[in-house]
């Protein structure tokens, strides 16, 4: 084992050891148990492993776990308020935007990061925020619907 | 319409399992936590075609922490395949594509697996590589499978090589028909290989049990075929193999099953676990998947059609060369379907088609979303526009002139009970604004129709088990990856039993408990499991009503279940709760267990007699072509579909939109690229381009009603047909915008610009 790092995930403080070469996605999933962070392309292209790191959305497959030392992370597991779903999460269910659901955590985290940045995003802001998230099931139409519904409910 | 007639059907019930998915509870194969599991990995061929002279695993085996190293020599001498049984669990004497599995390792860590895979020494004797399917048919081509015969149904006198499937279509007299045509259009089209690129990597996990059985976890679409393959390739009887379906993060046919997906991953994992006598889990890397698992094949299509001056089609002749890849895989089935669909779904009295499925040294053909259909339709529906142009006819009017009607036969359908094709054409025309919308320079509108003839296939069962509180637990053989299992299936059970959908649990597949099923494939979930679960729920309801009849002093026929209460029709105050009857049933008949089975053969026989109602569709696209860069922007996209009765509108729209998007990806950018050595040049997502949200328009899915299908309540399959028209639809829109016909996919800036330049534009 190499390094010991301390970090905050969804408000919980963790101290854990990791190899210097371990990707953050693997560290979050395998060591800390945040399996909502989805593993897919390992090249930072599909957005399935998106998390919020110190306020910014990042693809955790192209970040080293070691770089998260001292960081404040939010994963999809940290977005609902207890049993109460975040409006974006609820809207994904209500509009049928969840088919297989594998890309869903990444989309929700990207959108949460957007809504943390700006309360009333434009259509271009939304497209930009989730243009790094690939969905192969929906053709994105129901995801557009979900974003619109969530924005309406949050207004 | 639906809401008046039904309580649950036609509503947008929230997806079962939706909450787990939006909060990130691990429900997928990749999230499986198997205590003490070893890591597994597969050594893949670095040659596209080579003899295996020898495999030395001694160094790999000697590494501390390596628990199993297996090759074909460690497995029974059994091959697998669908129509050609041409493949070993691990390559035995030859490798036939770059990515062919050769050996596998289980070790204490992933790092050790990687190290051990590097230490396996395979001695290859390279053989000539053939990647072009046309070339592989020539006498001069190398032989890919020495002991595989040519298809028995090959027409006499045909001289070919490396062919592993033939489909002929012979209707009327195509030559005589062609001679009577006023106009003949003769074209050649070409499509490229794409990978389904479901987001969740394929996994397999296997655990040898104390009693000699083995448990296998798979994120496969067809758990029962996986069980068959694991048993046969490891030499175990079926009752010693248990396959448990995990949650599945996308599949699109790519996770069809071991055989049809040609990954063979589950049997390989089982062999490792049995050898190591420990649980093993394999997680594939996405780049490894792109080079080794099954794909939507590329094909070349020759199509020649004759028509009268008034637009009446008189004859079609054509040929399809369909790429199977290194093994037959699903090639014969997909190539056959492709050949039939090039024949089309219009009134056409004379058709002759020859379809050849051929081996090449590339990834193996799988049943990817509408296998063969999108490719066939790219050619057939682009060609229909070419004929319309040659005749000087409006493309919609030309198609309407030739649509089949009630009582007509089309390729693959002896008799139609009705035909929605004309209605979808007219509605698509209206929705896109054809003839009304003012098009700017380099903008154009295109149409393409589609069909997905409900094919033959095995039936399947369902069990509805009532609990003593009146809730229901449902077993079917279809998996949950966001199609019928979490939407339509629980709704049907709730509708029949008069209970809310919250009271219905649909279990994922466990081959020890679930009824046998061929898999979640072929747009058949509602047809097979929907029909079966309706019968099972009705069986359970009948048992319940018989028990309640005595208590309510009424005959069972006079009873109904409404909102968890069994009541006398017309006298709802005479009622008893569903829960009390189910509970009391324990002292009368035991559990209320309803059983249902969809009899596929009987359904097909019935439809041969009465005629069948097939799903038809028309898509319409408005595009803008940048003539300086060749870039095509899709401005508007409408998909009009007849999918019969719609049980869950949003789920059906989602299937249509997703299927259309996948083929829009193939239309605009997707392709797996090979060099002449058979090496995949774009294995990772960095180089394999797929549509993102800013590339696609918002797809408008519209359904028409009034054409009930063979599914429960008149549903038809909706999962694949949306992928059929898009490639032709975009090509036709580009033609409308620029006057240039692009006959080779993808319609990428490069290919479009080349076509524009060649046409002097």
Image (cartoon, coloured by chain):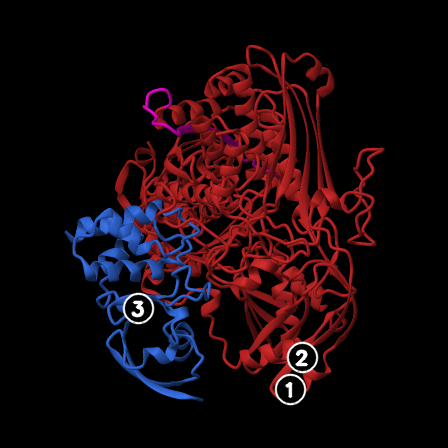
In this rendering, the answer to whether A55 lies above or below B570 is below
Range shown magenta: B434-455
Front in this rendered view, residue B501 or B25: B25
Residue A77 circle label:
3
Residue B648 screen position, x and y as percent: 37, 42
- Image point (46%, 51%), residue name: B690
What chain is colored red? B
Q: Colour of chain A?
A: blue
Compare marks 1 and 2 and give the one earlier in the sequence. 1
- Pinpoint the chain carrying mark 1: B
Q: Are marks 1 and 2 on the same chain?
A: yes
Q: Which residue is mark 2?
A: B119
Answer whether labels 1 and 2 touch (C-beta < 8 Å): yes
- Image point (67%, 82%), residue name: B60
Q: Quadrant of residue B626?
A: top left
Residue ranking furthest to the right: B157
* Numbered circles on residues, count: 3
Q: For the N terminus of chain A, which image quadrant?
A: bottom left
- Specify whether B504 is left or right of A129: right
Q: Which residue is mark 1?
A: B63
Circle 2 Cα neighbour tier, 10 Å, few/some/many (<14 / 14–19 / ≥20): some
- Image point (66%, 76%), residue name: B274
Give the spatial CA distance, label 2 vs label 3. Answer: 41 Å
- Pinpoint the chain carrying mark 3: A
In this rendering, the answer to whether B118 lies above or below B479 is below
Residue B662 screen position, x and y as percent: 47, 45
């Amino acid at each position: 084992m190499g390094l010991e790092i301390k970090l905050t995930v969804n408000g919980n403080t963790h101290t854990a050891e990791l190899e210097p070469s371990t990707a953050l996605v693997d560290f979050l999933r395998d060591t800390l148990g945040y399996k909502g962070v989805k593993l897919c392309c390992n090249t930072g292209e599909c957005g399935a492993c998106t998390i919020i790191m110190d306020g910014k959305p990042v693809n955790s497959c192209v970040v080293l776990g070691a770089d998260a030392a001292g960081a404040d992370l939010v994963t999809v597991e940290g977005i609902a308020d207890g049993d109460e779903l975040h409006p974006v999460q609820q809207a994904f269910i209500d509009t049928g935007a969840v088919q297989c659901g594998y890309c869903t955590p990444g989309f929700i985290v990207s959108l949460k990061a957007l809504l943390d940045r700006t309360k009333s995003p434009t259509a271009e802001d939304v497209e930009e925020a989730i243009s790094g998230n690939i969905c192969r099931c929906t053709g994105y139409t129901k995801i557009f619907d979900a974003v619109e519904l969530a924005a309406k409910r949050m207004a | 319409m639906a809401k008046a007639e039904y309580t649950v059907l036609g509503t947008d019930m929230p997806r079962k399992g939706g909450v787990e998915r939006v909060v990130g509870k691990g429900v997928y194969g990749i999230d499986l936590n198997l205590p003490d599991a070893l890591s597994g990995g597969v050594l893949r061929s670095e040659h596209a075609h080579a003899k295996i002279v020898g495999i030395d695993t001694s160094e790999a085996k000697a590494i501390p922490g390596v628990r199993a190293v297996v090759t074909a020599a460690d497995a029974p001498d059994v091959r697998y395949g669908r129509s050609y049984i041409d493949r070993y669990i691990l390559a035995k004497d030859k490798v036939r594509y770059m990515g062919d599995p050769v050996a596998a390792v289980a070790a204490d860590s992933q790092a050790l697996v990687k190290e051990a895979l590097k230490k396996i020494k395979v001695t290859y004797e390279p053989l000539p590589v053939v990647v072009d399917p046309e070339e592989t048919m020539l006498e001069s081509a190398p032989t890919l499978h020495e002991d595989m015969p040519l298809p028995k149904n090959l027409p006499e006198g045909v001289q070919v090589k490396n062919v592993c499937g033939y489909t002929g279509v012979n209707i009327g007299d195509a030559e005589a028909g062609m001679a009577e045509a006023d106009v003949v259009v003769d074209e050649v089209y070409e499509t490229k290989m794409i990978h389904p690129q479901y987001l969740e990597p394929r996994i397999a996990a296997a655990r040898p049990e104390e009693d000699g059985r083995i448990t296998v976890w798979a994120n496969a679409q067809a758990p029962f075929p996986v069980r068959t393959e694991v048993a046969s390739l490891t030499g175990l009887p079926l009752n010693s193999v248990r396959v448990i379906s995990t949650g599945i993060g996308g599949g699109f046919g790519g996770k069809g099953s071991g055989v049809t997906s040609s990954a063979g991953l589950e049997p390989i994992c089982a062999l490792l676990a049995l050898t190591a006598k420990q649980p093993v889990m394999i997680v594939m890397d996405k780049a490894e998947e792109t080079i080794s698992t099954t794909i939507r094949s590329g094909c070349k299509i020759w199509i020649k059609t004759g028509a009268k001056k008034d637009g009446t089609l008189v004859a079609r002749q054509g040929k399809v060369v369909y790429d199977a890849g290194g093994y037959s895989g699903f090639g014969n089935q997909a190539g056959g379907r492709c050949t039939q669909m090039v024949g089309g779904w219009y009134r056409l009295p004379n058709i002759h088609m020859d379809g050849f499925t051929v081996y090449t040294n590339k990834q193996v053909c799988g049943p990817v979303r509408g296998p063969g259909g999108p490719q066939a339709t790219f050619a057939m529906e682009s060609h229909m526009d070419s004929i319309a142009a040659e005749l000087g006819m409006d493309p919609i009017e030309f198609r309407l002139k030739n649509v089949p009607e009630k009582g007509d036969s089309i390729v693959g359908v002896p008799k139609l009970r009705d035909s929605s094709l004309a209605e979808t054409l007219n509605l698509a025309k209206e929705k896109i604004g054809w003839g009304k919308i003012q098009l700017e320079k380099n903008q154009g509108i295109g149409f393409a129709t589609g069909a997905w003839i409900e094919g033959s296939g095995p039936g399947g069962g369902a069990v509805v088990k009532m609990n003593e509180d009146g809730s229901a637990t449902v077993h079917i053989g279809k998996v949950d990856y966001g199609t019928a299992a979490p939407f339509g299936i629980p709704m049907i059970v709730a509708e029949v039993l008069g209970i809310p959908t919250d009271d219905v649990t649909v279990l994922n597949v466990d081959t020890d408990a679930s009824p046998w099923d061929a898999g979640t494939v072929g747009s058949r979930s509602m047809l097979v499991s929907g029909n079966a679960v309706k019968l099972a729920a009705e069986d359970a309801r009948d048992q319940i009503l018989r028990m309640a009849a005595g208590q309510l002093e009424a005959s069972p026929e006079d009873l109904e279940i409404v909102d968890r209460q069994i009541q006398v029709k017309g006298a709802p105050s005479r009622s008893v709760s569903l829960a009390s009857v189910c509970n009391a049933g324990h002292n009368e008949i035991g559990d209320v267990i309803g059983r249902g089975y969809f009899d596929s053969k009987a359904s097909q026989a019935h439809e041969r007699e009465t005629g069948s109602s097939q799903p038809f569709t028309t898509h319409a696209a408005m595009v803008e072509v940048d003539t300086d860069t060749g870039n095509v922007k899709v401005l508007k996209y409408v998909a009009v579909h007849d999918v019969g009765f719609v049980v869950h509108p949003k789920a059906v729209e989602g299937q249509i939109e997703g299927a259309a998007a996948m083929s829009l990806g193939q239309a605009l950018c997707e392709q797996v690229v090979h060099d002449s050595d058979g090496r995949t040049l774009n294995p990772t997502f960095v180089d394999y381009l797929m549509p993102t949200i800013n590339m696609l328009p918002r797809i408008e899915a519209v359904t028409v009603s009034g054409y009930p299908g063979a599914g429960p309540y008149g549903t038809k399959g909706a999962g694949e047909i949306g992928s059929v028209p898009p490639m032709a639809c975009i090509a036709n829109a580009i033609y409308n915008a620029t006057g240039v016909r692009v006959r080779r996919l993808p319609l990428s800036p490069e290919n479009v610009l080349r076509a524009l330049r060649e046409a002097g534009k």
